[in-house]
């Protein structure tokens, strides 16, 4: 029998960085652990936490509980700077061995813990002046046992202690809603401090604080001055603590960074004299230390370097580099010895345009890094205070570059990867990789819309639709906790949620409540709770969630219909005119009212999870009333919904807005017909895209969902891959089928929103989903699409790794499921109505897939549903000039869907006048396929073979 192993060392809150959790400002950090191995019948009955606070102070707490995710801190709160070592063990029937210890250390908690003040240089570091550098010095009279630097800035900071970087983070302190929450990092600088004299040099960049931010050309949103706050605390072996705090004793000088801006790039003069004196004074600037907060998630770092794939001269003679991947970061370039002051310019873009660097989509962002060489030998060039979204770079000032001298540096929030997917379908795998890259490029402290043009903002609607995918792919618990705190802080008293968080647009228009965007206030915390099991998120966000819904209720008024106003609606529906992305097929009032019902329902469920029965009842009742109002206003008794678009049916079906079963069935049928009419190409925007495949699947049209997913003609998820996309695009056709850039001023090649479909791919194609918060229960419900031979998903849940993999060979499907200790899986097999529940370990089932009877094609609809028959018909119709495209044929046949298949030729006849011989040939083709239908194989009988291997 498998013995019970020691649990993993405890994790504190959502901290995922290895090593001690430093700088905690949550003084009662919750603990989580996983148990790698346990006997088959193991169920946790208790855990014991040992907290070592000081030499003579070790506490032990036994808690009778089955919980292991974010359990409460059992002891007294941590004091500022207090360092503790924590280990634990768990009990089933017997106790496990003890875990490895983990260290947690509190940071500076209240303003009174700070001796330091924000300092800013005098006469230097102005808006259009070089980046300033500050220097402080400390004499340490003894052997150093511990040193911490607590630091943050108004602007970006890059700090060096005795010439060495204080750590490997970039763009510190990141971006938060600075006026409400400014993040402090605790750096462990013990190895960098020495006995005797030490100096710390800090360079300040404009960053989000003072740089250009927003598409209206604004800058200095948070202030006109850059400033630094730093407190270095050095403990020597005699127990004394020596403190260097920012104050007027520091000096300043100009750095060699002549210009730095997130959008425009950086200009660096490498001739800058490193020995130049810090002969400018600094002064203390008034700032509220009460806004300082600790880190919830990981900082930004370099996460990968990507070598150049190809270097060549463009038609106009420019030196171009292709890194083979659209990514976010900058270029690092080694240049050979050259004369001082020689200029090297690196420009960046995501695409090529007529063989040259395609900078059009960047709009006003210059994305240009310029260097004036020192002329002292080989030089390594890279910026510090900017980042670019690019796949291609253009380098000016060099005759040639060798591949080994140039690389792309990828940066981003250093999130831990938690989700994987793989299948036998290479394009689907590429779609998944593109989604992962899209997320990496847009999770730079704030979940942004895009990383390249003059925007890069925390658009609420984008993360609202992408959050289920994001939380599967990476551990976003800390990252989104922080962003949600910003969202709540930015909400006004009436509950309005700005369209971007942090809100730098600060305009009347962009705080007008708008559906799907403002609903990030309810949806993102709800998703996070489902994915991480962190009830604290609901507790902290509940007021924000509820006031958003209250505000919407006040706009909707007595009849509970949310009409008009500023609505992005089903943004970027592919049928909307390229220059009018608001103009979707779905009626904006239907979209808005559906979101109202959904958010009210989420608040009701959140209230229930929090044990607030009154609120649960109030919002539950509200959701019911909004549903009824939605029905009365927008839904015909037949199930038709106003505007008759795919997105409105998808919302109504997925959000339970159709209580009547007949209406629901009819809405599902209608949705399927609309998919047929769009010739199996996508017809949804931001709102409908994450819902459409679930809606089709749950309505019994999983084949249509898979057909949509695997479609390669534009618009579709896979079309961009046919033209080489390595990220998800903002528009379905950011690059047009003729190879030109969709040039309407809003065309990014790195927007994650439309990638939100892979959430469905994880849950229903691979079959791995959370069935209870934090994946304590896992739902295994793959649809086993016949287009795939093999498919697998793995997710690092809070309980440990869960995995589902299935494959088919010789008519036999094998399903393998891995369940972590502490969780259970509910497995649904095709053809078997019962749900099988299994505990931790590895499980395996096999079932025989029986080919379905070749059902005859009776109606025109049947013909469309038979992929092969439809493909042949389309080919015939296009080749014979009857229609220009598949889409035209699908539209032409739409009104005849219920007619007998033999009438296809007549249906075509009503619009087009083919020759008698063509018509006869068409009729012959139809008759041939109608008789010999090529129905897909379906798993009909499931033979349970639970070979549970408990490991
Ligand atoms: C952004 C979107 C955003 C939208 C608002 C755009 O400029 O890039 O992703 O959600 O504005 O509709």
Image (cartoon, rainbow, N blue to C red):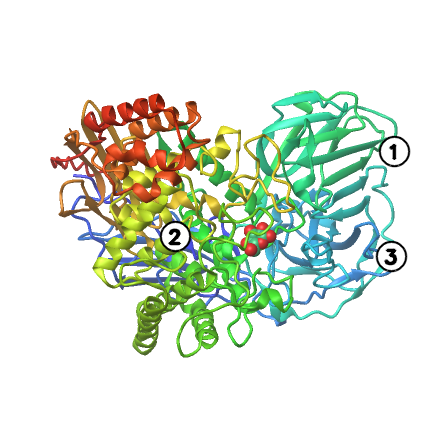
Residue wearing tag 1: 341
| First in sequence: mark 2 vs mark 3 | 2
Residue wearing tag 3: 280
Foreground residue among 228 and 557: 557
| First in sequence: mark 1 vs mark 3 | 3
Disc 1 to disc 3, C-alpha distance = 26 Å
* Viewport quadrant of the N terminus: top left
- Residue 657 shows up from this direction: yes
Q: Which residue is pictured at 33% across the width and 44% down the height?
A: 895
How many discs mark residues in the rendered view? 3
Asked whether the beta carbons under mark 2 and mark 1 sit within 8 Å of each other, the answer is: no
Residue 142: image location, x then y, percent: 67, 52
> Is disc 1 surrounded by few (<14), some (14 to 19) or many (20+) residues within 10 Å?
some
Foreground residue among 695 and 59: 695
Q: Quadrant of residue 545?
A: bottom left
Q: Mark 1: is the Cβ under 8 angstroms from ligand 1?
A: no
* Viewport quadrant of the C terminus: top left
Of discs 2 and 1, which sits in the foreground?
1
Q: Is residue 401 above or below residue 907?
A: above
Q: Mark 3: is the Cβ under 8 angstroms from ligand 1?
A: no
Q: Give the structural element (helix, strand or loop) at label 2.
A: loop
Residue wearing tag 2: 10
Residue 274: image location, x then y, percent: 83, 41
Q: Which residue is pictured at 79% across the width and 42% down the height?
A: 267
Q: Quadrant of residue 633?
A: bottom left
Foreground residue among 663 and 946: 663
Q: Which residue is pictured at 73% across the width and 61% down the height?
A: 246
| First in sequence: mark 2 vs mark 1 | 2
């Amino acid at each position: 029998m498998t013995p019970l192993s020691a649990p993993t060392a405890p994790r504190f809150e959502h901290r995922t960085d290895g090593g001690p959790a430093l700088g905690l400002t949550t003084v009662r950090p919750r603990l989580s652990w996983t148990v790698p191995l346990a006997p088959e019948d193991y169920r946790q009955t208790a855990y014991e936490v040992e907290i070592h606070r000081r030499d003579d102070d070790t506490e032990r707490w036994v808690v009778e509980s089955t919980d292991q995710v974010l359990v409460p801190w059992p002891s007294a709160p941590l004091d500022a700077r207090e360092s503790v070592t924590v280990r634990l063990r768990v009990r089933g029937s017997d106790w496990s061995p003890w875990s490895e210890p983990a260290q947690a250390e509190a940071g500076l908690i209240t303003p009174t813990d700070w001796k330091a003040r924000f300092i800013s240089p005098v006469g230097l570091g102005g808006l259009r002046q070089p980046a300033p550098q500050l220097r402080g010095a400390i004499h340490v009279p003894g052997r150093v046992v511990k040193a911490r630097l607590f630091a943050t800035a108004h602007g970006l900071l890059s700090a060096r202690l005795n010439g060495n970087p204080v750590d490997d983070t970039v763009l510190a302190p990141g971006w938060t809603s600075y006026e409400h929450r400014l993040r402090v990092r605790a750096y462990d600088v013990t190895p960098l401090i020495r006995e005797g004299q030490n100096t710390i040099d800090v360079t300040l960049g404009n960053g989000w604080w003072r740089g250009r931010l927003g598409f209206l050309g604004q800058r200095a949103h948070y202030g006109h001055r850059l400033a630094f706050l730093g407190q270095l605390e050095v403990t020597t072996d005699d127990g004394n603590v020596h403190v260097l705090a920012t104050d007027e004793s520091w000096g300043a000088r100009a750095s060699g960074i002549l210009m730095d801006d997130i959008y425009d790039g950086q200009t660096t003069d490498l001739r800058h004299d490193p020995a130049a004196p810090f002969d400018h004074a600094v002064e203390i600037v008034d700032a509220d230390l009460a806004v300082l907060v600790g880190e919830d998630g990981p900082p930004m770092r370099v996460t990968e370097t990507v070598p150049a794939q190809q270097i060549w001269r463009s038609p106009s003679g420019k030196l171009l580099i292709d890194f083979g991947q659209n990514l976010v970061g900058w270029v690092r370039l080694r240049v050979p010895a050259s004369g001082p002051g020689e200029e090297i310019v690196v420009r960046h873009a995501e695409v090529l345009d007529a063989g040259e660097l395609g900078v059009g989509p960047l709009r006003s962002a210059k994305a240009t890094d310029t260097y004036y060489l020192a002329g002292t030998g080989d030089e390594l060039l890279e910026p510090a205070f900017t980042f670019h979204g690019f796949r291609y770079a253009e380098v000016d000032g060099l005759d040639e570059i060798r591949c080994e001298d140039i690389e792309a540096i990828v940066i981003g929030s250093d999130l831990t990867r938690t989700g994987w997917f793989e299948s036998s379908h290479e394009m689907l795998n590429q779609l998944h990789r593109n989604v992962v890259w899209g997320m990496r490029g847009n999770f730079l402290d704030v979940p942004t819309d895009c990383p390249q043009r003059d925007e890069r903002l925390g658009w609420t609607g984008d993360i609202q639709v992408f959050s289920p995918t994001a939380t599967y792919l990476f551990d976003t618990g800390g990252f989104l906790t922080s962003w949600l705190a910003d969202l709540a802080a930015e909400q006004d008293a009436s509950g309005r949620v700005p369209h971007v968080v942090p809100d730098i647009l600060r305009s009347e228009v962009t705080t007008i409540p708008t559906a799907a965007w403002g609903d990030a206030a309810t949806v993102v915390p709800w998703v996070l709770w489902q994915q991480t099991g962190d009830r604290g998120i609901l507790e902290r966000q509940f007021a924000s969630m509820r006031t958003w819904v209250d505000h919407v209720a006040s706009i909707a008024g007595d009849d509970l219909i949310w009409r008009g106003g500023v609505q992005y609606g089903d943004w970027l529906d592919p049928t909307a005119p390229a220059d009018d992305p608001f103009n979707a097929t779905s009626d904006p009032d239907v979209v808005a009212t559906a979101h109202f019902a959904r958010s009210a329902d989420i608040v009701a469920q959140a209230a229930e999870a929090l044990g607030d029965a009154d609120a649960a009842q109030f919002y539950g009742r509200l959701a019911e009333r909004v549903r009824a109002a939605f029905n009365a206003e927008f839904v015909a008794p037949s199930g038709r919904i106003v505007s008759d678009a795919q997105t409105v049916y998808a919302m109504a079906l997925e959000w339970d807005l159709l209580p009547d079963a007949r209406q629901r069935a009819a809405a599902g049928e209608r949705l399927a017909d609309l998919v047929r009419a769009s010739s199996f190409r996508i017809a949804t925007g931001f709102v409908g895209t994450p819902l459409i495949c679930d809606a089709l699947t749950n309505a019994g049209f999983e084949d249509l969902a898979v057909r949509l997913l695997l479609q390669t003609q534009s618009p579709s998820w896979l079309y961009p891959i046919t033209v080489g996309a390595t990220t998800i695009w903002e528009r379905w056709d950011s690059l047009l089928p003729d190879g030109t850039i969709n040039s309407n001023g809003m065309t990014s090649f790195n927007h994650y929103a439309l990638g939100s479909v892979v959430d469905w791919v994880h849950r229903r194609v691979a079959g791995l989903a959370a069935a209870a918060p934090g994946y304590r229960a896992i739902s295994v419900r793959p649809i086993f699409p016949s287009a795939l031979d093999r498919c697998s998903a793995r997710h690092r849940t809070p309980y440990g790794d869960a995995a589902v993999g299935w494959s088919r060979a010789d008519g036999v499907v094998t399903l393998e499921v891995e369940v972590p200790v502490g969780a259970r899986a509910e497995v649904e097999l095709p053809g078997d109505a019962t749900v099988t529940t299994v505990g931790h370990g590895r499980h395996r089932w096999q079932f025989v897939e029986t080919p379905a009877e070749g059902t005859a094609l009776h109606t025109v609809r049947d013909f469309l549903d038979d992929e092969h028959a439809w493909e042949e018909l389309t080919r015939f119709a296009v080749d014979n000039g009857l229609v220009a495209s598949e889409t035209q044929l699908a539209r032409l046949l739409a009104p005849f869907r219920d007619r007998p298949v033999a009438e296809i030729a007549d249906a075509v006849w009503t619009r087009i006048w083919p020759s008698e011989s063509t018509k006869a040939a068409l009729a012959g083709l139809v008759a041939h396929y109608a008789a010999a239908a090529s129905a897909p194989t379906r798993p009909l009988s499931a033979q349970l073979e639970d070979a549970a291997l408990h490991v």
